[in-house]
Image (cartoon, rainbow, N blue to C red):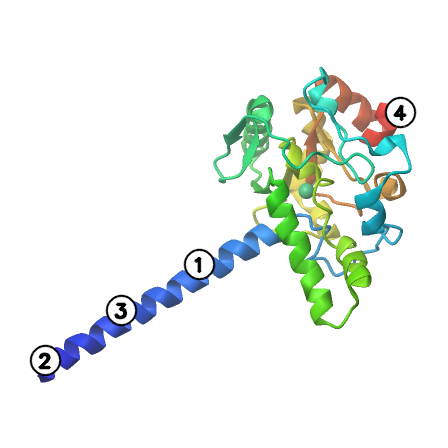
Amino acid sequence: MKKKSNTLTFMLLVLLVGAGAFLAWMWNTSRGEDIEDSQGSSSSDITSSLTSSQPEESESSSSSDSSESTDPTSDQDWALMLVNKDHPLDADYTVDMLQLDEGYYVDARIYDAVQEMLAAARAEGLSPLVCSAYRSYERQTVLYDNKVAEYLAMGYGEAQAKEEAARWVTLPGTSEHQTGLALDIVSSSFQVLDNRQADTPEQKWLMAHCHEYGFILRYPSDKEDVTQITYEPWHYRYVGKEAAKEIMEQGLCLEEYLES
Ligand SMILES: [Zn+2]
């Protein structure tokens, strides 16, 4: 009898420890995913250039021709696909994906370029770490809805909660991560998504060399008014070598390059 109850106690303990470890793992996993660029949610020095963003406008945009969804199938220049608030992607946009070592997926057509760039950085003794890449419409919806729920819980009205949420989390369909052509890369030794990321040797190297592999720094500090996205010294976007060279050397952003 005594022995049996000891065995039971032991099994209970094992179960509890197991459940605890599982919860801790879940917590870490979801946190890691949530970092991404919900426009620098972990950043303390956000100078929001997004105050003009009205979620209702983005969702119901019936006013202008610039709000047409990107049509990837007819686009020979797939690498120059523009996705932003005025150019949302369809919810069902999909492409062939390949998985990186870090577990994230990218458009299969840029897989080699990503690997080459990371290998070149590592050959210089650097430690770049991919912390986000492809993100589905559904995943973005969850991130956005969670943020809205936070504001509702704080007592905001629905319209205001949506507006506030949109300042922190990109609206579903308007995140470039849904294309599979964008990556967030940080320094292994500094994994915080804020302006200090720009000072790491990894970012300095990437900013100087990314165009050699067809990538651009997508949201530069001096283009916030054009991109409508706060400076992100970790978000790289594949556009092809030719465009990347021109964009980085002339100090443009993708919107400006496509207009010219
Ligand atoms: Zn990003």
Question: Where, by quadrant of the figure, is residue 12 drawn?
Answer: bottom left
Q: What residue type is labelled 4?
A: Glu
Residue 44 lies, in percent from the top left, at 74, 61
Q: Are marks 4 and 1 in contact (CB under 8 Å)?
A: no
Question: Where, by quadrant of the figure, is residue 130 drawn?
Answer: top right
Nearest the viewer among 234 and 28 is: 28
* Pointer 1 or 3: first along the chain: 3
Q: Mark 2 points at which residue?
A: 3
Locate residue 50 relative to residue 178 in the image: left or right: right
Q: Residue 14, which numbered label?
A: 3
Q: In which quarter of the image is ligand 1?
A: top right
Q: Residue at x 71, y 17 (%)?
A: 74
* Pointer 2 or 4: first along the chain: 2
Q: How many labels does the image show?
A: 4
Above or below, comparing residue 150 to residue 84 in the picture: below
Q: Do the residues labelled 3 and 4 touch (CB within 8 Å)?
A: no
Q: What residue type is labelled 3?
A: Val
Q: Residue at x 39, y 61 (%)?
A: 22
Distance from disc 2 to disc 1, alpha carbons, whole Å, reads 33 Å
- Cβ of mark 2 under 8 Å from ligand 1: the answer is no
